[in-house]
């Protein structure tokens, strides 16, 4: 049998990130059985490199090291070099990122890990320059030293011992939580055998507040009150889960401080360089403390979460600025990250033809060339801080909102409405001029989970901005169902007709959440039924009753050195947090599936961990607060929502509410029950039909409901008063 490591095999892969490395002199292998078997057969270590296509420093390391013949010679002779797209294999990334974080205190991409032939890590880092500089060891020197150490029996013994120690630490970090850590007064046992809440169960808003108190306190403590955001220096990440936490805490408590911190952060992100002031949408993060210079990649998941967060803030605060940021973000995604058949692509690269950020930055001359009128060009430069010196490389400027339209109107002796009109026209001119530049490459993977996140954002947009936005979310769900769902299980990735990788918990949880949110926005039972189907797989394949947790990988997935969970928020929300919240909500519709029992068991198992480090577990803390508060049910018996009801839903900030559409009559409801595979109507629908032949609303909290009401606003007011 020929040696698969005798050549670079990435030309056989569909991932754009892997194909970017297909011409390297390094004999890269995908993470597969052939590569792993070859490492054991040759008795050499594995060098594992994990990244993604939009990662700037991944490109830098490729240019410096992986295109270098001397580096390639060492990697090919002494290692099995394996390249992994972390967007396709989050399980591999999660395991070895954990090792990096445990050893170095931080992680990131590119992730560089040296493994024993059986996959145990013994040296780990992120970016390394080819040759040592600024206190960083050189990659070529590290590889040579690792190869020599592996060949030396005494040093190899030390490597094996370190690999055992690190693997044990990773397993302990990622393994099943200590079920005994659940608080003694939690509503379920550590094995998750308790059934769903009975109607006699009492929930308490104070309990929900207590579940969030630690996270809110930690978020306020970490807030940058000068520049907005969290942390005192750079880089600055958007952290939408933390902003959402503070918005919900402010709505619950009426406290000013959480709201002020949330507003400061939202304003800073929308005004600074994180936001694309010409084309809409948000970049990945900013490199500095004051949100000026971003890393220019644009990720689908960031734009999904931020669009939802700005819509929440708009409903809470009635700020049109926030609605506009969300609307332009959804427009950007629809325009630039859309598969023609309905799915959403994953990322836009940070780099384009002339280097990092060149597509997005401006000079005064470039503005004047794009905008015909000289005074309008000056307005643009003053508005967005475009100067001869610039704020980025080569005297270019990343646009940031520097002066208000009112200030510009005073300075130029114009009406503010005239300034606004001229700036709007100028943005169109800038957009058209920018379109002639070399565009950033696009990673055209369609990932099931990331599509679910964006479906949720379009569902929120449909409720808040325009009901027609639901159609775009529905197109994405239809695409995923056609290409990635076989009726029993999800695949994770589609690209150019190629389907690969079994779905992870995040795929089921994020997509299930998106489908459920789309049902809440539209009342289409097909979306609800799909969410329930996905949740059933979560229970069957990811939930472990003995360990009282929900793992990130299915029980029949590839066995790595540890079976990962994802209780922490990272670049995407905690899949465990999203899954538990989804299961709690869907239990209202399918109460005999064990959804609530699994969610409550997992939440109880992780409660001590969340309490110890709440800021890293915001999504999980919010799910536990939902459990503690109990459901807020808004049942709408209406074949078509009245316009005034749509206005109420668009204007109200209702965190945690479950909007349960149903047909007006029980006869029509029978068809829905058949579609869901239910024998009886669940309590959220039962007895809540339309009265007097008119659409009827029922608002219920803690198993106490408003009287049937033809006025949705009155039903909500009754709940608030009672």
Image (tube, rainbow, N blue to C red):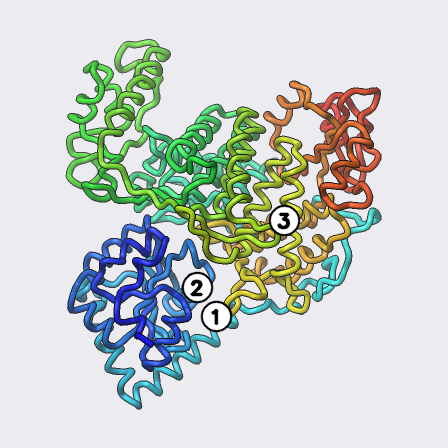
**Relative vertical location of residue 480 with respect to residue 77 in this rendering, above or below:** above
Residue 43 falls in image quadrant: bottom left
Residue 559: x percent and y percent? 51, 70
Q: Mark 1 and mark 2 in contact? Answer it, CB < 8 Å.
A: yes
Residue 328: x percent and y percent? 42, 28
- Ranked by sequence position, the earlier of labels 1 and 2 is 2
Residue 117 falls in image quadrant: bottom left
Can residue 329 be seen here? The reply is: yes
Q: Name the residue under label 1.
A: 560
Q: Name the residue under label 3.
A: 581
Residue at position x 34%, y 14% in the image: 421
- Rounded to the nearest whole Å, what is the CA distance between mark 1 and mark 3? 27 Å
Q: Name the residue under label 2.
A: 92
Q: Which of labels 1 and 3 is toward the front?
A: 1
Few, some or many residues within 10 Å of mark 1 (<14, 14–19, 20+): few
Q: Which of labels 3 and 2 is toward the front?
A: 2
Q: Residue furthest bottom?
A: 154
Residue 384: x percent and y percent? 28, 27
Element under disc 1: loop
Residue at position x 32%, y 28% in the image: 278
- Ranked by sequence position, the earlier of labels 1 and 3 is 1
Element under disc 3: helix
**Relative vertical location of residue 214 with respect to residue 259 in this rendering, above or below:** below
Few, some or many residues within 10 Å of mark 2 (<14, 14–19, 20+): many
Few, some or many residues within 10 Å of mark 3 (<14, 14–19, 20+): many
- Rounded to the nearest whole Å, what is the CA distance between mark 1 and mark 2? 8 Å
């Amino acid at each position: 049998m020929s040696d698969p490591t005798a050549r670079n095999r990435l030309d056989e892969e569909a991932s754009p990130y892997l194909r970017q490395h297909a011409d390297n002199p390094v004999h890269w292998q995908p993470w597969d059985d052939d590569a792993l078997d070859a490492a054991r057969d040759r008795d050499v270590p594995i060098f594992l490199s994990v990244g993604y296509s939009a990662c700037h420093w991944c490109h830098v390391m490729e240019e410096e090291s992986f295109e270098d013949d001397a580096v390639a010679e060492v990697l090919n002779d002494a290692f099995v070099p394996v390249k992994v797209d972390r967007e396709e294999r989050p399980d591999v990334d999660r395991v070895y990122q954990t090792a990096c974080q445990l050893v170095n205190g931080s992680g990131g991409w590119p992730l560089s890990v040296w493994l024993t032939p059986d996959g145990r890590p013994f040296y780990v880092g992120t970016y390394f320059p080819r040759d040592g500089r600024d206190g960083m060891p050189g990659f070529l020197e590290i590889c040579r030293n690792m190869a020599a150490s592996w060949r030396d029996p005494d040093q190899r013994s030390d490597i094996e011992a370190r690999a055992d120690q690190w693997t044990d630490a990773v397993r302990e970090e990622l393994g099943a939580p200590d079920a005994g850590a659940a608080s003694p007064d939690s509503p379920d046992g550590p094995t998750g055998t308790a059934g769903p809440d009975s109607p006699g169960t009492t929930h308490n808003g104070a309990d929900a507040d207590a579940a969030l108190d630690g996270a809110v306190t930690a978020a306020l403590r970490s807030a940058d009150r000068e520049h907005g955001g969290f942390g005192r220096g750079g880089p600055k990440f958007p952290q939408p889960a933390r902003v959402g936490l503070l918005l919900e805490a402010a709505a619950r408590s009426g406290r000013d401080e959480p709201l002020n911190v949330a507003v400061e952060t939202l304003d800073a992100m929308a005004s600074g360089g994180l936001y694309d002031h010409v084309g809409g949408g948000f970049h990945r993060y900013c490199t500095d403390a004051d949100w000026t210079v971003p890393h220019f990649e644009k990720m689908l998941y960031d734009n999904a979460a931020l669009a939802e967060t700005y819509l929440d803030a708009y409903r809470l605060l009635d700020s049109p600025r926030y609605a506009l940021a969300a609307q332009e973000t959804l427009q950007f995604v629809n325009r630039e990250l859309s598969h023609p058949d309905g799915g959403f692509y994953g990322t836009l690269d940070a780099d384009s033809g002339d280097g990092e950020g060149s597509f997005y930055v401006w000079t005064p001359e470039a503005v004047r060339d794009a905008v015909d009128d000289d005074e309008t060009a000056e307005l643009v430069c003053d508005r967005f801080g475009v100067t001869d010196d610039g704020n980025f490389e080569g005297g270019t400027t990343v646009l940031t909102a520097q002066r208000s339209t009112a200030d510009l109107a005073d300075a130029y002796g114009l009406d503010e409405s005239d300034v606004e009109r001229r700036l709007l026209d100028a943005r169109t001119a800038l957009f058209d001029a920018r379109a002639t530049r070399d565009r950033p490459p696009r990673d055209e993977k369609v990932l099931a989970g990331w599509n679910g996140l964006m479906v949720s954002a379009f569902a929120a947009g449909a409720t808040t901005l325009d009901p027609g936005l639901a159609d775009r979310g529905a197109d994405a769900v239809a695409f995923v169902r056609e290409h990635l769902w076989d009726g029993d299980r999800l695949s994770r990735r589609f690209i150019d007709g190629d389907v690969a990788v079994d779905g992870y918990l995040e795929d089921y949880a994020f997509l299930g959440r998106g489908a459920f949110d789309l049902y809440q926005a539209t009342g289409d039972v097909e979306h609800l039924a799909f969410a329930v189907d996905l949740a059933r797989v979560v229970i069957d394949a990811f939930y472990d009753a003995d360990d009282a947790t929900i793992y990130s990988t299915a029980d029949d997935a590839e066995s790595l050195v540890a079976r990962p969970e994802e209780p922490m928020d990272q670049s995407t929300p905690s899949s465990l947090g999203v899954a538990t919240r989804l299961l709690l909500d869907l239990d209202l519709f399918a109460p005999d599936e064990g959804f609530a029992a699994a969610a409550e068991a997992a939440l109880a198992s992780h409660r001590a961990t969340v309490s110890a480090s709440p800021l890293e577990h915001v999504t999980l803390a919010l799910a536990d607060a939902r459990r503690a508060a109990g459901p807020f049910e808004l049942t709408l018996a209406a074949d078509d929502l009245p316009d005034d009801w749509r206005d109420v839903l668009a204007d109200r900030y209702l965190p945690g509410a479950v909007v349960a559409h149903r047909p007006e009559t029980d006869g029509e409801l029978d068809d829905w029950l058949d579609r869901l595979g239910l024998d009886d109507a669940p309590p959220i629908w039962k007895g809540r039909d339309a009265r007097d032949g008119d659409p009827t609303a029922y608002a219920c909290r803690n198993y106490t409901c408003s009287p049937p009401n033809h006025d949705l606003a009155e039903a909500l007011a009754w709940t608030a008063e009672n």
